[in-house]
Image (spheres, grey):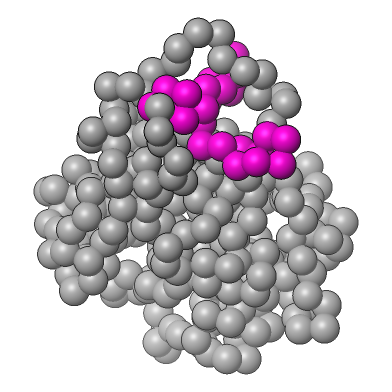
Amino acid sequence: MKFANLSVDGKHAVALVDPEGGRYWPVSDLVPGFTGDLVDLIADHARLAQALKPSGPGQPLSGALLLAPIDRPRRNIMCVGKNYHEHAAEFSKSGFDSSAKAGELAPEAPVVFTKAYTSVIGPGAFIPAHETVASQLDYEAELAVIIGKPGRGIKKADAFDHVFGYTIVNDFTARDLQKLHRQWFLGKSLDGFCPMGPYVTTSDEVDARSLDVKCWVNGELRQSANTSQLIFDIPTLIETISAGITLLPGDIIATGTPAGVGIGFSPPRFVRSGDVIRIEIQGLGLLENAVA
């Protein structure tokens, strides 16, 4: 199944969607009395699951505006840095990585940071350039895990039992701020620096252990990899993060970006106003945003 967060005639609607058929079904129609957001649906999915099936012809998806599927996260987005070998190497060589040990090409443990929840925007929304704050803007195509079942101290063997589904995230970054402040929060968390969407695809629809991840800038393919190439796989990330932090329904874990980001080129190829970033992850759809 795929779920979306829509704006229809100025009102929000959580919906079951069929992108190929171009139709949607508001959850409030399938489950009378439901007034929550997608996080509420995820938290109560076990009870609601039987009712969450297409009923009737649905409504045309063309008449709705797609928002970020979780446009008001309850907490910061948890992210993983340097989680593909080739990207870890390009970042280390770029001169922008103040976190690496001397000679290190890959981290010895997951590099975990967060993006502020206020950075989230939806498909088609403009990414603010923040010209008075930063000048070296970069893109990062990433598979994001959506937690469904809460837990702390989750073991690798049980990790996928806690996953509700997946979406696409662009871990947009101001490289100059990332380098200047050494820790990454400011460079990653400016308003609008977390495009997300277009849908949340439930975990039974895709095998997240092997999904193609691609990113184009102005039509030029820049990133192309597969999630099988992650240094630390999804179970490892969930076990690591949940060791002392309770994961909650609706929590988002962005799993890292492949090689081909702007700082991987010599000279770096940063994006600027007017550039269009298009990300596709197998089975999850397309996320496209332009820099304002």
State the residue lying farthest toward the right. 274
Quadrant position of the N terminus in the picture: top left
Nearest the viewer among 60 and 180 is 60
User: To which quarter of the image does residue 278 belong?
Assistant: top right
User: To which quarter of the image does residue 120 belong?
Assistant: bottom right
Q: Which residues are magenta?
A: 6-31
Queried whether the magenta region covers residue 66, the answer comes back as: no
129 horizontally vs 27: left or right:
right
Nearest the viewer among 32 and 97 is 32
User: Is 152 situated above or below 142?
Assistant: below
Q: Position of residue 210 (x, y in %)?
A: 37, 38
Quadrant position of the C terminus in the picture: bottom right
157 horizontally vs 72: left or right:
left
Residue depicted at 19% across the width and 43% down the height:
161
Residue depicted at 42% across the width and 88% down the height:
102
Q: Position of residue 256 (x, y in %)?
A: 45, 59
94 horizontally vs 208: left or right:
right
Q: Position of residue 164 (x, y in %)?
A: 32, 42
State the residue lying farthest toward the front. 33
User: Is 7 situated above or below 189?
Assistant: above
User: To which quarter of the image does residue 96 belong?
Assistant: bottom right
- Answer yes or no: is residue 242 visible: yes
- Answer yes or no: is residue 284 visible: no
Queried whether the magenta region covers residue 17, the answer comes back as: yes
Nearest the viewer among 105 and 40 is 40
Disc tally is 0
User: Is 59 situated above or below 127?
Assistant: above
Q: Position of residue 137 (x, y in %)?
A: 72, 70
User: Is 218 situated above or below 259?
Assistant: above
Residue depicted at 60% across the width and 86% down the height:
179
